[in-house]
Image (spheres, grey):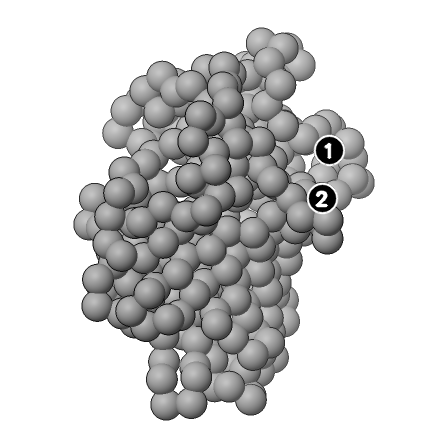
């Protein structure tokens, strides 16, 4: 087991679909190319040369946000009487997106269509123990089955102290999807609530969406301008929440499904207008501060030896 300093691929034997993972920088799956005969559709947006370094780490691919997703106001919080301070990193004076997405991961297993990586704070960067209440560990597994990328994320508490955690994925979905005009792509979002933000940080207040039906039925990407936090996720009877991006020109569609550990969804439209981010999170951003104030946030506190498993699938049709 070692830190790979290059891109590793997984490939589906039947379709030729391929995913590329930058294991030395957050285990970031920065490319997922679906295949339909001779037609190939790149699903994930990444800045040119991202895999060579020197680019904003959270600005491409599928960053994995852990042990906290989104922002912590001012980068400071208190947990069970202990105060912590994390260096602000969002340009606004807040800490953002945890630690795991900026650091090398160890590759535990790599097969033709499957790869497993792990980041363990006390093993891979012990300096982080000064910034979080307990040691933390995350394992990510990607597998390709046809034109479907399955992601399984396992979090556990390897320490002897309670561990507050949140997790999220931050996929940059490319628009258009092989078509001519990204503005015509239609995005469905199964949400019914929105959180109030102060400087992009949730205050804990939330309200019902007046136009939730429009989100469910689909919004043209050309009408979307978001950096918003949504709740009230709608799960189907099978236990999965489903969001889609459809390109009417190419007639291709991406469907992302995720399971019930996720409670919140951030939707972000980057300024370059070449992608839309739909980010399932297990808690609200700023969760450690909201929780300390007695405001429900979805923060999980894992006791020693406890674990959490979350799943996200991305399928192209």
Q: Residues within 10 Å of mark 1 (few under 14, many from 20)?
A: many
Q: Position of residue 195 (x, y in %)?
A: 46, 23
Mark 2 or mark 1: name the one nearer the start of the chain: 1
Q: Position of residue 6 (x, y in %)?
A: 40, 71
- Pointer 2 residue: 308
Under circle 1, the secondary element is: strand
Q: Position of residue 105 (x, y in %)?
A: 52, 57
Q: Is residue 180 left or right of residue 131?
A: left
Under circle 2, the secondary element is: strand
Disc 2 to disc 1: CB gap under 8 Å: yes
Q: Is residue 267 left or right of residue 306?
A: left
- Pointer 1 residue: 302
Q: CA distance from mark 2 to mark 1?
A: 8 Å
The disc placed on residue 287 is none
Q: Residue at x 32, y 57 (%)?
A: 185
Q: Residue at x 46, y 26 (%)?
A: 209
- The vertical placement of 106 against 84, above or below, is below
- The vertical placement of 198 against 177, above or below, is above
Q: Report the front residue among 208 and 286.
A: 208
């Amino acid at each position: 087991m070692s830190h790979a300093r290059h891109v590793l691929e997984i490939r589906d034997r039947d379709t030729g679909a391929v995913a590329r993972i930058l294991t030395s920088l957050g285990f970031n799956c920065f490319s997922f190319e679906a295949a339909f005969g001779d037609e190939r559709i790149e699903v994930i947006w990444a800045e040119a040369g991202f895999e060579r370094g020197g680019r904003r780490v959270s600005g491409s691919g599928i960053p994995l946000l852990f042990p906290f997703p989104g922002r912590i106001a001012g980068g400071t919080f208190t947990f069970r009487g202990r105060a912590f301070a994390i260096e602000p990193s969002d340009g606004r004076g807040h800490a953002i997106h945890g630690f795991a997405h900026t650091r090398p991961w160890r590759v535990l297993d790599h097969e033709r269509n499957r790869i497993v990586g792990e980041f363990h704070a006390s093993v891979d960067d012990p300096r982080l123990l000064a910034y979080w209440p307990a040691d933390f560990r995350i394992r990510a597994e990607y597998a390709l089955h046809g034109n479907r990328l399955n992601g399984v994320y396992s979090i556990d508490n390897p320490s002897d102290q309670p561990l507050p955690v949140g997790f999220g994925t931050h996929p940059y979905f490319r628009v258009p999807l092989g078509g001519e005009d990204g503005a015509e792509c239609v995005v469905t979002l199964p949400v019914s609530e929105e959180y109030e933000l102060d400087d992009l940080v949730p205050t804990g207040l939330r309200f019902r969406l007046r136009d939730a039906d429009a989100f469910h039925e689909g919004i043209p990407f050309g009408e979307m301008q978001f950096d918003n936090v949504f709740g009230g996720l709608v799960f189907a009877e099978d236990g999965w929440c489903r969001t889609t991006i459809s390109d009417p020109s190419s007639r291709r569609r991406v469907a992302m499904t995720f399971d019930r550990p996720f409670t919140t969804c951030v939707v972000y439209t980057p300024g370059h207008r070449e992608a839309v981010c739909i980010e399932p999170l297990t808690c609200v951003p700023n969760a450690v501060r909201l929780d300390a104030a007695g405001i429900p946030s979805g923060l999980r506190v894992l006791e020693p030896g406890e674990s959490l498993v979350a799943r996200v699938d991305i399928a192209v049709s």
